[in-house]
Image (tube, rainbow, N blue to C red):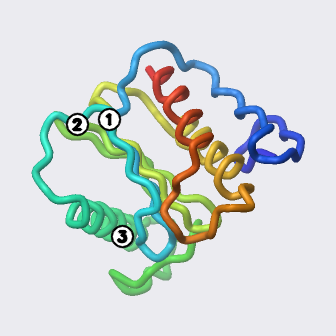
Amino acid sequence: MQFFGGSSLTSVAPEASPAPAAPPGTGTGSNAQVLYVFNRNGVCLLYREWHRPLRTLDPTQDHKLMFGLLFSLRSFTAKIDPTTAEKGNLGVPLLPGQGCSFYSFKTNTYKLNFMESPSGIKLILITHPRTGDQRDSLKHIYNLYVEYVVKNPLYAPGTLIKCELFNKHLDQYVRTLI
């Protein structure tokens, strides 16, 4: 079963499940640099690095700063949403899907791509600044997460993701990103 469009997969044991099909328009090369997966409480469940030339922070600080950035940007975009009269308080947590949202922002050295699932899982993919829209890629990564992590009977929700099949399919998919 895919949660963000596409055909549904048959329900099979996690180790026998086929990988969800890659979205159209992906090619060879790898522009993905870093992937973060946070749960709704801000716990970093997965941190994967493919190309990060400079490490300036320890991982704990890095995860806290990234989640804080997401929390602030999400709250800010909801606060300045021109389509809603009820603005709420800046900094108050929003439910998934509530208020205005952002998908990405770009600097001169990287592009941050963001997606939040209905269950509150937050995916952040850092790519090269000239990389196009990565919403379909993030949806595909989320479908891999559901297929190989959530459906895995050995995985305890809220714990670090250490699923070899997920990591294998994630690495294969990231190599195809344009």
Three-letter amino acid code at the position of disc 2: Arg
- Identified at 52% across, 56% down, the residue is 161
Q: Give how far apart the Cα atoms at labels 2 and 1 are.
A: 6 Å
- Identified at 71% across, 33% down, the residue is 19
- Identified at 70% across, 28% down, the residue is 21
Label 1 Cα crowd, 10 Å radius (few <14 / some 14-19 / many 20+): some
Image spot of residue 152 (x, y percent): 71, 56
User: Which residue in the protein does label 3 denote?
Assistant: 71
Label 2 close to label 1 by CB (< 8 Å) = yes
Judged from the image, the secondary structure of the residue bearing numbered disc 1 is: strand
- Looking at the rendered image, the disc whose residue lies closer to the viewer, 3 or 2, is 2
Judged from the image, the secondary structure of the residue bearing numbered disc 2 is: loop
Three-letter amino acid code at the position of disc 3: Phe
Image spot of residue 47 (x, y percent): 38, 51
Q: Is residue 71 above or below residue 87?
A: above
Q: Horizontally, is 80 left or right of 39 in the view?
A: left
Three-letter amino acid code at the position of disc 1: Gln
User: Which residue in the protein does label 2 denote?
Assistant: 52
Q: Give how far apart the Cα atoms at labels 3 and 1 are.
A: 21 Å
Image spot of residue 151 (x, y percent): 74, 56
